[in-house]
């Protein structure tokens, strides 16, 4: 069975991730400046609301460079079964927030793993695409949101 991009994945609630400092986990925990860039490189494709082919950003890079968790959470998907994403990792940060990391050369975490913000979770690659890049999405309540305003300026 092959999953498509728009299939719903059953995801059971996970405990809230521990925060290094600050208030309780939840929506206020994920504001601009608290997310981290998942990898180094130039943004070569930007988010476009309503365009199913641009529900995140694409960051160009070199094969094998580290892909890191943008925030702490639990890995709820690690595989290659979603068409169009290649080797994909999805992290659940709270009941509201997910992040997705696609086109990896190699996944370094399994489903159920707890990850820290900044922890390496994959090696950048080109699975499912023609160039070495990371496809990065943030979703709030299942809906794609533009990651750029949530990430620190660089």
Image: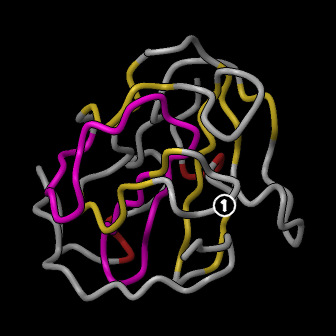
Q: Which quadrant holds the N terminus?
A: bottom right
- Where 73 falls versus 3 (above or below)? above
Residue 13 x, y percent position in the rendering: 24, 87
Extreme-front residue of the structure:
1
- Residue reaching furthest to the top: 62
Start-end of magenta stretch: 89-117
Residue that appears at 39% across and 45% down: 70
Q: Position of residue 146 (x, y in %)?
A: 69, 58
Coloration mode:
secondary structure
Quarter holding the C terminus is: top right
Q: Quadrant of residue 78?
A: bottom left
Residue at figure coordinates x 62%, y 51% from the top left = 85
Spot occupied by residue 61 in the image (x, y as percentages of width and height): 61, 16
Does 10 lie within the magenta span? no
Residue that badge 1 annotates: 83
Give percent across and percent down for residue 47.
Answer: 78, 52
Rendering quarter of residue 133: top right
Q: Is residue 96 left or right of residue 52?
A: left
Q: Nearer the viewer, residue 96 or 11?
A: 11
């Amino acid at each position: 069975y092959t999953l498509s991009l728009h299939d719903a994945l059953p995801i059971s609630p996970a405990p809230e991730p521990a925060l290094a400092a600050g208030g309780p986990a939840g929506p206020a925990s994920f504001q601009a400046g608290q997310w981290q860039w998942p990898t180094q490189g130039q943004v070569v494709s930007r988010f476009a609301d309503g365009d199913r082919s641009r529900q995140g950003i694409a960051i160009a890079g070199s094969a094998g460079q580290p892909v890191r968790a943008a925030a702490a959470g639990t890995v709820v998907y690690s595989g290659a079964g979603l068409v169009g994403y290649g080797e994909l990792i999805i992290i659940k940060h709270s009941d509201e927030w997910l992040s997705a990391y696609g086109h990896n050369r190699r996944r370094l975490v399994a489903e159920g793993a707890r990850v820290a913000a900044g922890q390496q979770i994959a090696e950048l690659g080109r699975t499912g695409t023609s160039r070495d890049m990371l496809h990065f999405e943030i979703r709030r309540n299942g809906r794609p949101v533009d990651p750029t305003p949530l990430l620190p300026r660089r």
